């Protein structure tokens, strides 16, 4: 399986995004976390479009990139509608669900904590429908128990959100 | 070298340098100026490649205010000063001219009138834009922008430490120009120059190259003005032939000033 990248916040529907993105790279230039890079390679559809590898640097939802997009490919949406994807928690790998230690790292770092990522019964992390798929929890998880699914794959496969 | 050409080279090198400076500044947390030759933001003033704007409209059916404004700035420049983007600003224009000079130095200066490059471009870009409108293809003509690749290569280097594979197009075009000495890319391929050419050829009054036959001291046999034209055009020919392709670099006028001064660069109505 080829590696799947996230789009920056506000990209919305993948096809509409690709029609509007003019490969100017301004989103990548203003990203203070160097999370956005520009797709290399010779594919004329993809080359130069922005992408995020959440395992190297996730999106912290600072939302500086949508306003600089000149073509409207990235829409200036509120954080709750960033709509980049969805995080999936693999309970069999999670420290807390295994009962080994009380971890909470994902909860502490989630930019939308208490809405996108909540603690059930005081300490069991649960990812809700409010998750926008920024990839921070996947990045910080010491057990690699979380994977972030890009929004475009969810629409392609009918949107299964259960982990 | 003529004074005008020295100034022009300075401007060209400054612009080429600017697109090294900007990604460096961005990498050092300065975000006032961002972008590349497809779209550029200068302290919130948007500038854009008009063809990129047209492509977004063709493929998605909508267009942002920034792209409209940015594209219109470029079109207004072409309508008043002609295609000076190509001769004074475009970094690929500079690279192409230098390659041509190298070729001419190696083989000796030679002038031959070359076929007009406007129609092949018009047909090619027209077909792609039609496909974009019908099939919703993404703005793929951006991948053929040589100034785009110049700036994108440097941009990628500062963002992620790699030169994108598409930069190979830049090297290929450079090799073509160096070997042929004919500026093949600029004249026959560059899709981005099409809108600039269309605009300048329809401008009622703009900066133009004007030839006054009565003052020409060279006659028809000797043509120093033709020999210096980077686009192999004939400044002494029919004025309409210069309308589309001449990009107002001014080299012929500087050269002619040493002779009869028959060629001048000034604001003139459409011939």
Image (tube, coloured by chain):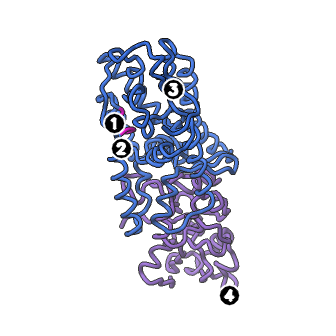
Chain colours: A purple, B blue
Q: Is residue B137 visible?
A: yes
Front residue of this view, candidates B100 and B166:
B100
Q: CA distance from mark 2 to mark 3?
A: 23 Å
Estimate the x, y position of residue A92 in percent, counting from the top left: 49, 80
Q: Which residues are magenta?
A: B183-187
Is A128 a magenta residue? no
Q: Is residue B1 visible?
A: no
Query: How far from the left and from the top, in percent, is residue B76?
Result: 59, 46
Q: Which residue is situated farthest in the bottom direction here?
A: A121
- Disc 1, disc 2: CB below 8 Å? yes
| SS type, badge 4 | loop
Q: Which mark is residue A11?
A: none
Are the residues under badges 4 and 2 in a single subunit? no
Instruction: Please name the residue shown 36% across and 48% down the image.
Output: B121
Q: Position of residue A72 (x, y in %)?
A: 58, 64
Residue ID for mark 3: B250
Q: Residue at x 42, y 37 (%)?
A: B240
**Which residue was labeled with disc 2?**
B189
**Circle 1 residue:** B184
Mark nearer the viewer, 4 or 2: 2
């Amino acid at each position: 399986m080829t590696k799947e990248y996230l789009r920056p916040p506000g990209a919305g529907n993948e096809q509409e995004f690709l029609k509007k993105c003019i490969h100017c790279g301004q989103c990548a230039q203003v990203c203070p976390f160097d999370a956005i890079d520009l797709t290399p390679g010779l594919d004329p559809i993809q080359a130069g479009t922005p992408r995020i590898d959440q395992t190297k640097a996730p999106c912290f939802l600072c939302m500086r990139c949508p306003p600089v997009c000149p073509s409207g490919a990235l829409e200036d949406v509120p954080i709750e509608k960033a709509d980049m994807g969805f995080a999936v928690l693999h309970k069999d790998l999670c420290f807390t669900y295994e009962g080994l230690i009380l971890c909470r790292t994902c909860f502490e770092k989630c930019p939308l904590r208490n809405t996108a990522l909540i603690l059930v019964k005081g300490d069991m992390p649960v990812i809700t429908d409010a998750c926008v798929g920024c990839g921070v929890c996947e990045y910080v998880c010491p057990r690699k128990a979380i994977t972030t699914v890009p929004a475009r794959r969810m629409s392609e496969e009918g949107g299964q959100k259960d982990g | 070298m003529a004074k005008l050409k020295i100034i022009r080279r300075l401007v060209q090198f400054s612009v080429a340098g600017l697109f090294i400076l900007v990604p460096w500044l961005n990498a050092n947390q300065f975000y006032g100026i961002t972008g590349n030759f497809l779209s550029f933001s200068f302290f919130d003033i948007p500038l854009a490649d008009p063809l990129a704007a047209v492509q977004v409209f063709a493929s998605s059916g909508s267009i942002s205010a920034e792209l409209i404004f940015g594209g219109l700035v470029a079109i207004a420049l072409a309508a008043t000063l002609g295609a000076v983007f190509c001769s004074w600003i475009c970094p690929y224009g500079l690279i192409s001219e230098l390659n041509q000079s190298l070729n001419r130095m190696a083989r000796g200066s030679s002038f031959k009138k070359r076929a007009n490059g406007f129609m092949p471009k018009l047909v090619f870009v027209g077909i792609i834009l039609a496909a974009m409108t019908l099939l919703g293809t993404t703005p793929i003509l951006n991948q053929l922008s040589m100034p785009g690749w110049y700036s994108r290569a440097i941009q990628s280097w500062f963002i992620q430490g790699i030169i994108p594979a598409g930069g190979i197009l830049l090297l290929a075009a450079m090799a073509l120009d160096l070997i042929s000495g004919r500026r093949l890319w600029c004249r026959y391929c560059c899709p981005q120059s099409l809108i600039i050419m269309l605009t300048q050829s329809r401008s009622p009054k703009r900066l133009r190259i004007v030839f006054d036959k009565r003052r020409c001291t060279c006659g028809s046999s000797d043509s120093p003005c033709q020999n210096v034209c980077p686009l192999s055009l004939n400044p002494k020919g029919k004025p309409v032939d210069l309308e589309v392709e001449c990009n107002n670099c001014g080299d012929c006028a500087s050269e002619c000033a040493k002779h009869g001064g028959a060629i001048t660069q000034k604001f003139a109505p459409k011939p």
